[in-house]
Image (cartoon, coloured by chain):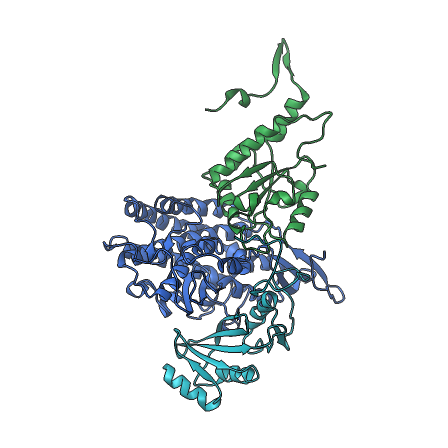
Amino acid sequence: MNLLGDPEITEEGEFVINIGPQHPSTHGVLHLKVWLDGETIKKVQPHIGYIHRSIEKMSESLSYRNFIYVTSRMDYLSAHINNEACALAVEKGLQVEVPKRAQVIRILLGELTRLASHQLWWGSTGLDMGAVTPFFYAFREREAILDILEETCGARLTQNFMVPGGIMYDLHPNFQKRVKEALVQIKEKLREYDELVTGNVIFQGRFKGVGYLSPEDAINYGATGPVARASGISCDVRKWFPYDGYENVEFDEVLDTGCDCWARYMVRMNEMKQSIRIIEQLIDNIPEGEIQAKTKQVIKLPKGEFYQRVETARGELGVYLVSDGGSTPYRIKYRTPNFSNLWVLSHITLGAKIGDLVAIMATLDLIIPDIDR
Amino acid sequence: MTNEEIKQCISEILPTATYDETGEFLTIMVSKEELRPFMQTLRNDEKFLFEFLFCLTCIDWKTHFMMVYHLLSRKHHHNIVVKVKLDDINQPEIDTICDIWKTAEYLEREVYDLFGVKFGNHPDLRRLFLDDNWPGYPLRKNYVDENMISI
Amino acid sequence: MVDTEKLVFPAQLHQTPDGGFLVTQLDDIINWARSNSLWPLVFGTSCCAIEMMSAADARHDWSRFGFEVARASPRQADLIIVAGTIVMKMAPVLRRLYDQMPDPKYVIAMGACTISGGPFFYNTYSVVKGVDHVIPVDVFIPGCPPRPEALLHSMITLQEKIKHETYFGKDNKAQAK
């Protein structure tokens, strides 16, 4: 079986190398075919499908309560936010109102997940650039957050905590105290991160001026999230189409006009600070009340289509749910942020060197199962 | 712009379009021959400026296919949905819009891979997720696979 | 309780006036050396890869047990931890990686997806339902995803399994016929 697919047409002096599907960069199974002239890249062609688990087909036979768990496995670093998107889409169809307590807890868990995801991104960016220390530092903070999530939700990575109507169980009594302690630790360590990597001359030299993505291209390719915000495009779903009470929370949308890898890096570092700001506003003001709205045991959505968008750590996730009146979805389409962000790669690596390709992949922050679904 | 204003502007340029306002966004049904010029107007015209195509997919309704395009305009702050009905379920075909929005090139490849819809004038129409010699199109409702274990 | 007999060096020391010499069996000494320096291959496809990375970090730290260096190339690795779902497009790649590894080689199947397809068992057309359809497996770890401590427990189980192998006169147990 020809694993490589299309023919390799090369000009004089060019050669083709395959990067992946198994490679030490921790982004997943992505196969890149790179046409090289010496060390300069002429063309990059991503091949995907090595983790295509047929999630959309499978969701057509799962009930409206059950299909939420699969999305934890799609973009596993923002598992809470993915689950929130599915629960919100079903609630839109049922037209139930989520109680205030559940909304605030959803925001808190979502922002904690965003912090943990950005920490892991920072660690693996350092690892890709050849520095092993950021990897260990980042996981130290991430473990602090995962401990809190495990105490409340029961799992470290793939929590299945959202249900249509609210959240599954109430918070653990230790939640507020532990979050405050973790925030103190993380704020101090963010200064350490800045000293270690952000102020480092070698990292700055490798990131500045590399991988330029103009704003027109970012819109054309459908890029969202930090990738688009680093090119100056305002696209944060929490500001444009607020959900779950985000309109009552004060935070800034982080924009940068650099358009290169350094801008993408700084956008994510500043987003971590904004997430901490949101958590600090809400942690002492969790309202009392119910955690789940009343819904029937077997949920049946009325005939129609429902689209819900949320802001995951990587961009805009859209859940397009088509229902024909039955107890399982008729068609679900997940508009994933990483799918649109990936195809930017072949555009911005023209003329760069192989070392720059690694820097660009690190700052694009792709999760491959989210692309393949 | 509100839904009424959009409907008015569109009926001036395309009188044969039909509307559906039962969902969350205004839905416009067009025929497949009218699709390309209509999409170009939606992108370039000052009144609309839908520069962001955020979802392109297909739904198999067993008697026909329905292509669905979701568009967003950040300048005017509105969303619409454009739908095209494809009646031929054995050989569905439609024109590509990947020269209008670059992201459509890959979303259309995905629809070709999973549903079998052919896009005319597409620069590189190949399968995306599955192997080149995979039999059939999995997301169709009449897809049969003996390796698939169903409950 | 830790079995302290297994922790000692598998030899007997005979003291002589100017030093001493160790008496052991070749099987014991070779198994001891092999099990305490297994180098895993960097191979993760989906969510279990994150828990594998967590097992490598400072809190759980698999290098205490000898898995110090995770090699990028299969030619230099002893152990492949299959972390994540394997789909039909990836299965030939996994087989090729396994064939490229030199003997003796071991396989740990991590997570529910590698045991039987896991949460993707019903109504999927592209998932390989169990990685033992592709390569022979030594240790299975249930969980979705398994905790890093579970991965460490499975690595220690593999070390104990290796200590029971025989070197001369029989084939390496991990090698399929």
Which of the pair A317/B116 is nearer the observer? B116
* Image location (x, y in percent) of residue A39: 67, 60
Q: Residue at x 56, y 69 (%)?
A: B107
Q: Residue at x 44, y 71 (%)?
A: A233
Labels in figure, total: 0
In the rendered view, would you say A218 is above or below A63?
below
Which of the pair B34/A286 is nearer the observer? B34
Chain with colour cyan in the figure: B
* Quarter containing the N terminus of chain A: bottom right
* Image location (x, y in percent) of residue B103: 54, 71
Q: Is residue A64 left or right of residue B61?
A: left
Chain with colour green in the figure: C
Q: Quadrant of residue A354?
A: bottom right
- Work out which residue is located at the far top of the displayed protein and give it: C17
Q: Quadrant of residue A212?
A: bottom right
Q: Color used for chain A?
A: blue
Residue B37 in sight: yes
Which of the pair A267/B111 is nearer the observer? B111
In the rendered view, would you say A125 is above or below B117?
above
* Image location (x, y in percent) of residue A101: 27, 56
Residue A277 in sight: no
* Image location (x, y in percent) of residue B66: 52, 74
Q: Is residue C153 left or right of residue C137?
A: left
In the rendered view, would you say C176 is above or below A338?
above
- Work out which residue is located at the far right of the displayed protein and give it: A12
